[in-house]
């Protein structure tokens, strides 16, 4: 298979049928040797983390399928740490869509003058640009349109999909006694123009709590399976 | 008169008729002794700057009045460096509304991956929170509503007013051969519920160019009067 892209936590190959094969690796993002799913550098390697993230992605992508949500997911091979997905084009150079149920992290760093840590938010959805150099800046609907990253129709579609998808994941976690605080999603466009969820869906995408206790993304699988 | 507030560049007094009296001072914001209208600390004092800002505010507020735009402005006393204004309540702890015609400053710092310095923008309007400690963070329409700072109706009204006001100021500057790159406005609510432009309207609120040359805010008056 042809290697298309060497990523921070996954390599991407072109499959023979035109689909993509994502190879999950044991590298995780972090700073100074500490795991941090929001960090932009690979900080360390943890044995088994690739498989763990693939198992969780498989679990959530299949749940979404049961709920008639289209994603890029086709199949997963847990033994070989690979996931087969449809090819999709990202918007601009990539955007991240964050859905928030409780105020933590960058929301508090930005809006701490008004928001209290842990305050309830109504699936508040916002978009940031994937841009390591500029620390993934927040961007408005109007600026996304002006910069030809997302037009208003695509923006509305993505925000709607984000609230649907995040709600499904939130309810899955609730079944296990867990609370979803926030989640980060990525979207792409298929050849037929359909907008679908892409990338992975694992502990690193979301902040999950059990009561007041933050669940380490690496421990999340123990609660789910 | 009762002193209500000692500001960075203006002091505010309560007038006898219930209106406010703004006393323009010669302190300007800046960092390390350099004038920077966007800075959050008072950096130095320049003789005559208060009077200069008041003259320009009077000029623009009266232009807006001719164009039937309501503002908090009542009158100006150039000799005594004071402006009488209607009392208005700010939104939350204060927001700044930025209208951009050319991409410079924080727009490029945030979106430099997509935008080129000086690129044309269609009166792109965005809102930041007045919060020195958090470097005046950008905030979306949805977050403004969730945090009870601006509801959607107020947001739409303020964005509409901003585009009107900025357009009038842009055209006034064009008459003098000057180009408005961006401008920062503040709004408040009068007792009767009307949303109006507040604060001052001087060189420190706007970035103005003559051709490719940036005009120092302190020099702007020479072109206007």
Image: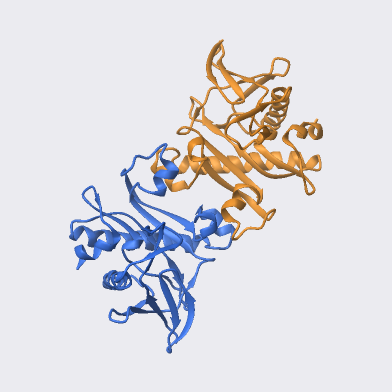
Chain colours: A orange, B blue
Q: Which residue sits furthest bottom? A: B16
Given residues A17 and B155, the one toward you in this image is B155
Res B9 → quadrant: bottom left
Res A114 → quadrant: bottom right
**Residue A140: percent from left, percent from top:** 47, 48
- What is the quadrant of the C terminus of chain A in the image? top right
Q: Is residue B69 visible?
A: yes
A64 horizontally vs B186: left or right = right
Residue visible at 61% across and 23% down? A10
Residue visible at 37% across and 55% down? B99
Given residues B102 and B47, the one toward you in this image is B47
Given residues B51 and A140, the one toward you in this image is B51
Residue visible at 23% across and 65% down? B221
**Residue B127: percent from left, percent from top:** 46, 56
Q: Please say if A138 is above or below A32.
A: below
**Residue B117: percent from left, percent from top:** 33, 42
**Residue B37: percent from left, percent from top:** 38, 59
Res A44 → quadrant: top right
Q: Please say if B152 is above or below B84.
A: above
């Amino acid at each position: 298979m042809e290697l298309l892209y060497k990523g921070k936590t996954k390599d991407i190959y072109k499959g023979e049928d035109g689909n993509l094969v994502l190879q999950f690796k044991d590298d995780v993002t972090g700073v100074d040797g500490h795991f941090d799913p929001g960090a932009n550098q690979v900080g360390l390697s943890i044995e088994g983390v690739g498989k763990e993230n693939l198992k969780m992605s498989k679990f959530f992508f299949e749940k979404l399928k049961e709920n008639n949500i289209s994603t890029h997911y086709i199949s997963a091979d847990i033994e070989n740490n690979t996931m087969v997905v449809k090819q999709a084009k990202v918007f601009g150079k990539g955007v991240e869509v964050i859905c928030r149920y409780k105020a933590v992290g960058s929301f508090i760093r930005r809006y701490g003058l008004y928001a209290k840590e842990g305050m309830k938010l109504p699936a508040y959805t916002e978009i940031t640009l994937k841009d390591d150099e500029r620390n993934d800046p927040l961007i408005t609907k109007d600026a996304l349109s002006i910069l030809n990253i997302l037009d208003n129709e695509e923006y509305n579609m993505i925000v709607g999909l984000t609230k649907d998808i995040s709600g499904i994941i939130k309810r899955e976690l609730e079944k296990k006694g867990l609370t979803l605080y926030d989640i980060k999603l990525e979207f792409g466009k298929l050849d037929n123009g359909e907008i679908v969820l892409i990338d992975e869906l694992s502990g690193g995408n979301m902040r999950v709590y059990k009561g007041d206790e933050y669940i380490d993304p690496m421990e999340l699988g123990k609660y789910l399976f």
